[in-house]
Image (cartoon, rainbow, N blue to C red):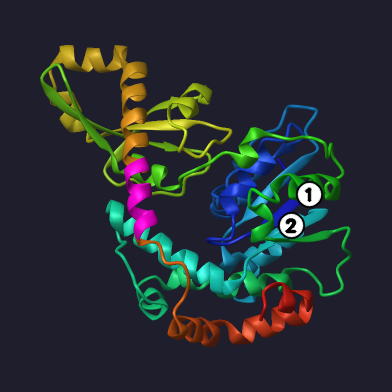
Amino acid sequence: MKPNLTVISFGRVGTMAINRFLNVHPQIVAPSYQCLPLVINSKDRNLDHFGKVKDKKVKIKAMVVHHGDYLDTNHQDELNFIRSLKTKKIIHLVRNPFDQALSWLNNAKSRGLIGASGWKPIESFDKFLQDHPYQAITLKQGLQAQGFYNKGAKSSKVKLLDFNDLLEVNIHKTMADIYQFLKINSTFKSDIFTQQQNSLTENIMAQGIEFELNGEKIQIAMKPSSISYLEIEDFKPWITLHDTNDLFEKCPSLVPCKGDIELFIKDMAEFQKLKYSTREMFLSNTGNIISEALEEWARRAELVGLQVKKTKMSCLSDKDRDDVFNFIKDDLEIFTDYHPEYKSKWDL
């Protein structure tokens, strides 16, 4: 698949949301933001990693750029490759960097609560910058990305999309505007646009769940293969589920997506040590096991969601705002030079 739309988006600005909202339209295919690194790192930059599109109704084939390095002149090879694709349209997602920083702090706190590997509750931006520099740099990358296209780029080619426009109160108008920009059916609507989601569910699923079968213990994990970026250590893919609609109904907090869900089983060597009858029971009851696991994951996600809500920070401290400003001020000045309307829009 050769893309004809570039979507530029970085951490905590709505990447997964726009990925889902674009994908649900029958005239759009928007592969996961994981796909571009696969293409870039493959032999001969094989575009098949974006997938193959056979449906003739599809008019828009999106490429999601979620790695700031790829738009950095210090990585000229990757930048030249992306530019060589010459996509006809560009959507650039942006977010008030102070809100983005607050979102990162709350995200770190949430991941710390569920015990996600490498994460722990963080109370200040300065500490976040020290512990998670790769995530913190996304504040600068989002502001720098306008350099990918020319300052005088025609509005018919580039659409700047603010994170707040993806919120439920604005979403139907926002998506209609995007569809008009892409010159496809702009009257299309979907329940997914307003469906509640809890991104923590993916993290909880990836951690795995232990259950007893035939008097023996088995641990499994799952992840949506088309949107998840998690690396699941010690797990090997076991089953790929292609029909996922029922699963999303059983686990409403799971982020809906087009694509597969992968089931993992921990340590195949240990699995092979189980009684033959246990292994047979597992293989013949996969559907029931997944159904029960999803219900448990949904329950855990709801409980964690309540914990997160109690500890969620509503605003940055004065010191955090100063630290964020000092971190991004040069990039913010350049961005608002390109887009002066954002000075008032973000109340800068």
On screen, 58 above or below 149?
above
The spot of residue 315 in percent (x, y) is 48, 71
Q: Nearer the viewer, mark 1 or mark 2?
A: 1
Q: Where does the C terminus fall, quadrant-wise?
A: bottom right
Residue at (70% x, 83% y) in the render:
334
Q: Nearer the viewer, residue 221 or 77?
A: 221
Residue that mark 1 sits on: 178
At mark 1, the secondary structure is helix
**Quadrant in which residue 68 is drawn:** bottom right
Q: Which mark is residue 91?
A: 2
Residue 48 in view, yes or no: no
Q: Which residues are magenta?
A: 302-310
Q: Nearer the viewer, residue 57 or 346?
A: 346
Characterize the local packing of mark 2: few (<14), some (14-19) or many (20 or more) Cα atoms within 10 angstroms.
Answer: many
On screen, 260 above or below 179?
above
The spot of residue 23 in percent (x, y) is 66, 38
